[in-house]
Image (cartoon, coloured by chain):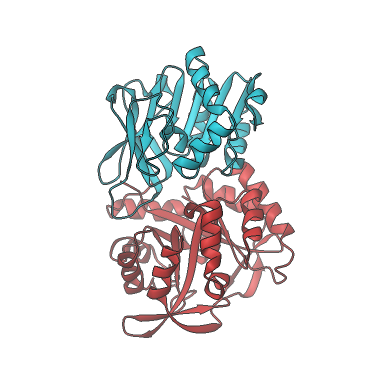
Chain colours: A cyan, B red
Amino acid sequence: MQVGIIDWGGGNLGSVVRALRAVGADVVLAATPDALSGCERLVFPGVGAFGDVLGGLRTRGFDRVLLDAVQEARPVLCICVGLQALFEGSDENPDVPGLALLRGRVRRLVAPKVPQIGWNRVERAGGGAGGVIADGHYYFVNSYVAVPADPSVVAGWTDHHGRFASAVAFGSVVTTQFHPEKSGEAGLALLRRWLGR
Amino acid sequence: MLTKRIVPCLDIRDGRTVKGRHFVDLVDAGDPVELAARYDAAGADELVFLDITATIEDRGPLEHVLQRVAERVFIPLTVGGGLRTVDDVERMLRAGADKVSLNTAAVQDPELLTRVAKRFGSQCVVLAVDARRTDPGRWEVVIHGGRTPTGRDALDWIREGVARGAGEILLTSMDRDGTGAGFDLELCATAADAVPVPIIASGGAGTLESIAEVLSAGRADAALAASIFHFERFGVRDVKSFLRARGIEVRP
């Protein structure tokens, strides 16, 4: 089964590629939507500023790919700013519209130390994205968090001077604010569950 | 709540792990890839690779080590030691590092922090500061592995570094480094209060108690240690069970 990684033109994708390969995925790094055509599953890793991620996504035409994937119920895993991009907008770059696949906005964390850097605990919520999200400690690096208007999409909660949605899921889409590719065995196990292995 | 991090540091020379105190009497300690995998299995939260290769022009062996580690170990990896340019940083990130630690080069060219943070993001910029106490409540920055005093106030430099884009501070007390006499708690707590980014405390880890202290009274977010793990005085697991018993939250 081929897993296509959306290379929107920024960020270091090496660790996502390596982690997916380590759990047995056949990985395609795609710099164009065409390169994803044979992929059954998509991964959208976002590292960087909200505006840069959305800009890169739109320039390369990946926004359309994600909207289509949702329509076609193609499985998608979004990581970090990949999660945030699905909402309507972000305080980080208020002028840049999000993909608006989910209602709600991305807000700056209110905490003594921002960004949040380190391992934090995720508590699965609801069905935990069909069992993909499990309780445990995962690695976070983020200054912003999504605030979903509809709490029923939350698949995991985490506390950092207040509770925030650390995993969100709807339809065929699973998203994590943390980095499964850097979360040791817990992260690899999550990737295996997402791949159905 | 964020857990406190335990960060083993591996000293690398010519692609091999070396053990030593104050960079003298170095003993070959084997393949860094095996050691990194062992620390990971024992519950290390991150790993730091400090390159002490004499000829910094040749980073081939270090890159090779990083590539092999990154294929096996899926926790954050930081690399430091002699990195001077944006290109150096890019090579390390491409090889598999998640963060780079900048020390002497940043003091000599503070703009470097800004350039690296702009290009790759603050999340991958660790400013390493070696500080030596000069007067009560005052520390100065020393560079070149602790050999050259700069006269620069350490707290002042840490604030500037964060303003320029450093996402974390790796703070080493040169007075305590290699002594096992415990961390400089005052230095650490002062720095933790001065900037809104995590402090990784280093220099002086000798006992389990000293690690618990720096993560509580010292207000550090993470504790880095080399000798106690290299010489197997304690394992990462021992440190974590001790901290847990003290009510300090760590990742299981």
Residue sitting nearer the eye, B214 or A155: A155
Please indicate whether residue A112 sits to the left or right of residue B172 in the image: left
Q: Quadrant of residue B213?
A: bottom left
Q: Is residue B231 visible?
A: no
Q: Which residue is the extreme one toward the top?
A: A72
Q: Which residue is the extreme one toward the bottom?
A: B135
Q: Which residue is the extreme one toward the left?
A: A162
Residue sitting nearer the eye, B217 or A77: A77
Residue drawn at x 72%, y 63% as measured from the top left: B14
Residue B27 in the image, given as x and y percentages of width and height? 65, 69
Residue B5 in the image, given as x and y percentages of width and height? 41, 53
Residue sitting nearer the eye, A155 or A57: A57
Q: Is residue A179 visible?
A: yes
Q: Which residue is the extreme one toward the front?
A: A95
Q: Quadrant of residue B83?
A: bottom right
Residue B5 to residue B161: above or below: above
Residue drawn at x 56%, y 28% as measured from the top left: A62
Residue B58 in the image, given as x and y percentages of width and height? 74, 64
- How many marks are shown on the rendered structure? 0
Please indicate whether residue B230 sits to the left or right of residue B195 in the image: right
Residue A112 to residue A159: above or below: below
Residue A8 to residue B6: above or below: above
Residue sitting nearer the eye, A154 or A121: A154
Residue B103 to residue A190: above or below: below
Point out the image quarter for the C terminus of chain B: top left
